[in-house]
Amino acid sequence: MTAHLRGAPDRDRFTAETERFRRELLAHCYRMVGSAHDAEDLVQETYLRAWRSYSGFEGRASMRSWLYRIATNVCLTALEPRPIRVLPSGLTGPYDGPDRPPRPLAPGEVAWLEPLPDAWVAPPAGDPAAVIVERESLRLALIASLQHLPARQRAILILREVLAFSAAETAEILGTTTAAVKSGLQRARARLGELEPEPVDLLEPADQRARALLDGYIAAFERSDVGLLERVLRTDATLEATPFRDWQSGRARCVHMLGAYVLGTPGDWRMIATAANGQPAAVVYHRDADGALRADGAVVLAPTATGVSRVIKFHDPALVTAFGFPDVLAH
């Protein structure tokens, strides 16, 4: 009983001191591993480890950097046995072969990148103490590129350039030297420069132009309207979807593939607008043989002033409920 009474205030103090960092730690773990669900599990593990060692926390580092040390090392341990998560464009160049329907890869053949619902990391309204996660650091193009860096270089780059920890703080978090951090950062920057696509000036999700493009994309699917798709996409647009290896480059190819093999007839698809990775997105439902609109996945757009430059569709029905929407839509 005495131990229990002594532990309760400690747990209350621990929660008060650490809980405000949960959302930014989730974003950090997501940048490291490229999976929203894995990131959630890793944050849980971070808090378990932090609680177990809380009595030994002596305040030599800030609570924030102490938690980042635990979270980063939890992520590095988790990444050791795992293949990197990728998008189709990280596997091969755009498809330029004969016309044919897209072919899915076998389950488990590739570990696919997942989108991150904005709601998971957005600070609570009216909470001035919440740390605002920079949207640019969660863009899908960046997250996809980060996964191709060696895990420790990835950690160094994120800690230094996204989270603005000093070289000394980063060395402390990773249990290494400042010199090793500096050389790791140089290599990571060089590799990222090779991996990242040409920079595109994306519109913010709240921008009316971005919302108009998302609304147009949704309407094109719900009406099975190829002409509307052509008006929404940029000439150089790309289209990729997990779990398919082939991806399309150029509006003509994108529109043809969607029109020939995906759009179907009006009413086959239903989409609901949301946001992911700091970009406009939608959860996707497809009408089954019984007429029910069932969860199909999520789509994330890269909107620019001249149209949508990139469409990434994630065929994973579980994403719909992860975004907070029902598995089946009522008629």
Image: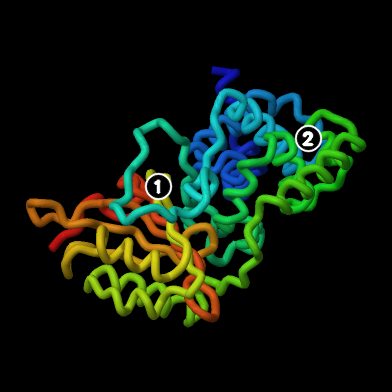
Residue 81 showing in the rendered view: yes
- Residue 325, percent from left and from top: 31, 55
Q: Which mark is residue 242?
A: 1
Q: Where is the N terminus found, in terms of image quarters?
A: top right
Quarter of the image for residue 78 reads top right
The answer to whether 232 appears left or right of 144 in the picture is left
In the image, taking residue 52 as reference, residue 282 lies left or right, namely left
Using the numbered discs, state the Cα–Cα distance from disc 1 to disc 2 in whole angstroms: 34 Å
Judging by the rendered image, the residue that carries numbered circle 2 is 173
For the point 87% across and 43% down, which residue is it? 167
Q: Quadrant of residue 138?
A: bottom right
Residue 22 shows in the view: no
Label whose residue precedes the other's in the sequence (1 or 2): 2
**Horizontal and vertical percent for residue 330?**
16, 60
* Residue 186 horizontal side relative to residue 328, left or right: right
Observer-nearest of 68 and 77: 77
Q: Residue at x 53, y 39 (%)?
A: 85
For label 1, the SS is strand
Would you place residue 198 above or below residue 98 in this image? Answer: below
Q: Position of residue 23 (x, y in %)?
A: 57, 49
Callout 2 secondary element: helix
Between residue 194 and residue 291, name the one nearer to us: 194
Q: Nearer the viewer, residue 227 or 133?
A: 227
Tag 1 and tag 2, C-beta contact below 8 Å: no
